[in-house]
Image (tube, rainbow, N blue to C red):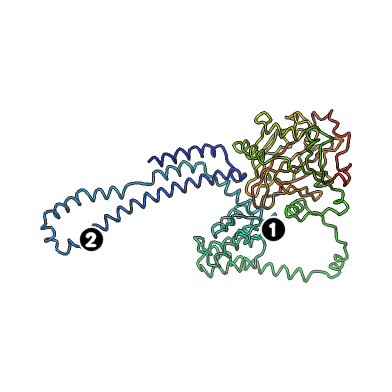
Amino acid sequence: MKLQCWYFVLLSCLLQCLSAHNDFFTSIGQMTDLLYTEKDLVTSLKDYIKAEENKLQQVKQWADKLDSLTRTATQDPEGFLGHPVNAFKLMKRLNTEWGDLESLVLRDTTDGFISNLTIQRQYFPTDEDQTGAAKALLRLQDTYRLDANTISTGDLPGVTYKSSMTVEDCYELGKIAYSDVDYYHTELWMAQALRQLDQGEESSIDKVTVLDYLSYAIYQQGEIERALEYTRRLLALDPEHQRAKGNLKYFEFQLGKQKKAEEAKSQNEKPREKRASEKQPKKKETIPERKKYEMLCRGEGIKMTPRRQSRLFCRYYDNNRNPQYILAPVKQEDEWDRPYIVRYLDIISSSEIEKVKQLAKPRLRRATVHDPQTGKLTTAQYRVSKSAWLTAYEHPVIERINQRIEDLTGLEMDTAEELQVANYGVGGQYEPHFDFGRKDEPDAFKELGTGNRIATWLFYMSDVSAGGATVFPDVGAAVWPRKGTAVFWYNLFASGEGDYSTRHAACPVLVGNKWVSNKWIHERGQEWRLLFTSPPPPRNAPSPSSSL
């Protein structure tokens, strides 16, 4: 009883923390709480199993004893009962002991476990979390060009804890894609479920159910012949399947109709028109931003020419002999030239990172973006992460970090936004966006009253096993997370106009846990800091002799 009470108290404390959050799938950091919750549930379940086993052991001992007794007694009932003690004990057993046994069998040992489970269930992830995590897997599949079998077998780069998917898992992914009218992914995951069933995996999902979804998804993509093939396979397993019987006739009719149309088209084609079309010069295709973004995430982006590469350096940097860094300058390296992006190495310590995470974690909420129409913060499907804002007066570490950014950039921090800490969830990403407000967004930062975002400072507070790069699709730059480093770039030109080449994105995290924190620096307060009197390093690059 004391043990059950202890669990109740512990779980109540844990769940009070969990109750303040939702959208678990958007933050790996907060999902770790769920692991501890599940661990406690398993402990409670094992206690329940132990109590049931003890009860069954007592019942078994009673049954064994009576089995031996009744076997002897029924060989000579009258002789057995001729002994007065045996007669007395028979009366006692039937009148008292069998009643005690009944009470033992009916004793409910589930109270502790069921109470714990009931309390926790109201704070469990929702259907939205499950769907969000499923869509994240589909997003990772597309971005990193992973086939369904690679994901299902868990053969991902950089994994420490390999985990495979069951037929039920694959089927669930296919169903979620189907409910989203995403027949492409429906086909991929129903085909994977079928493949694993064909390989002999045992499952509560049967081939008929999978083939039903698979054939329809393929038909919806215009491949009638393949849809017909799978429908025939379904009917071979279940000849009375009514929907499949109807689909068979319909697919056969549509296939015949399609073949006739193709024949008519080929006969009506004029050879000279074909030749004329062949002579037309091919237009240079522009790569869509989405495709460039995904290529950069995979490390397939534009490669900088050797000439441009030779102009990038690494150096010890003290920001024009800032007193804080004269004796101990920081390590700085050029990441890209246009726009100019620099990385600072060993710029935030592990202890500082842990303190920032400790302060931020209880406050993490679904990350927001500025609505260009209203100027207010709102959640968006293209940003999958949770964030928290930390002010300088909350802890000396935050104040020290803000001062460090000011010393190294020479920019005023009083008008900058608070330090934003972000933790990315399953397949966490932030699709291409600008940090600054464009001309068609005059009210983007009106509520702040500090002008536009002049520059961005971004700390990487964790290494990421695979994925998670910061990419700039318009110029082909990709900056990869390295714990303890930070990158910095200007969002505005000297004229105050936005630098559209700074459009950037956070690639989906394939494997790992990505923590970042950033500082958005605004125009106000920079007027007397001679921001643009001397050009930034890219236009006045140091000589190789000053490099590391």
Tell me whether the residue at label 1 lies in contact with that at label 2, contact meaning CB atoms closer than 8 angstroms. Answer: no
Q: Position of residue 60 (x, y in %)?
A: 30, 56
- Spatial CA distance of label 1 from label 2 is 68 Å
**Residue at x 83% of width, y 41% of height:** 499
Q: In the rendering, at what x and y percent does residue 15 appear?
A: 51, 39
Relative to 355, residue 218 above or below: below
- Residue drawn at (19%, 49%) of the image: 95
Q: What mark, if any, has residue 68 been given in the picture?
A: 2
Which element is circle 1 on? loop
User: Viewer-proximal residue, 298 or 276?
Assistant: 298
Label 1: which residue? Answer: 145
- Quarter of the image where one finds residue 409: top right
Give how far across and how far down residue 407 sits, in percent: 78, 33
Q: Examine the rendering and report whether any part of residue 98 can be seen.
A: yes
Nearest the eye: 337 or 277: 337
> Label 2 crowding class (10 Å Cα cut-off): few <14, some 14-19, many 20+?
few
Which quarter of the rendered picture does the N terminus lie within?
A: top left
Amino acid type, mark 1: Arg
| Residue 364 seen from this side | no
Which amino acid lies under the numbered mark 2 shown in the image of this protein?
Ser
Question: Mark on residue 274?
Answer: none
Image position of 275 (left or right of 41): right
- Point out the tag, 1 or 2, that comes first from the N-terminus: 2
Say what secondary structure mark 2 lies in: helix
Say if 19 sits above or below 42 in the image.
above
Give the number of the mark in front: 1 or 2. Answer: 2
Residue positioned most to the front: 327
Would residue 468 be found to the left or right of residue 322 on screen?
left
Residue occupying image coordinates x 57% and y 62%: 193
Q: Nearer the viewer, residue 238 or 176?
A: 176
Of residues 108 and 127, the one nearer the viewer is 108
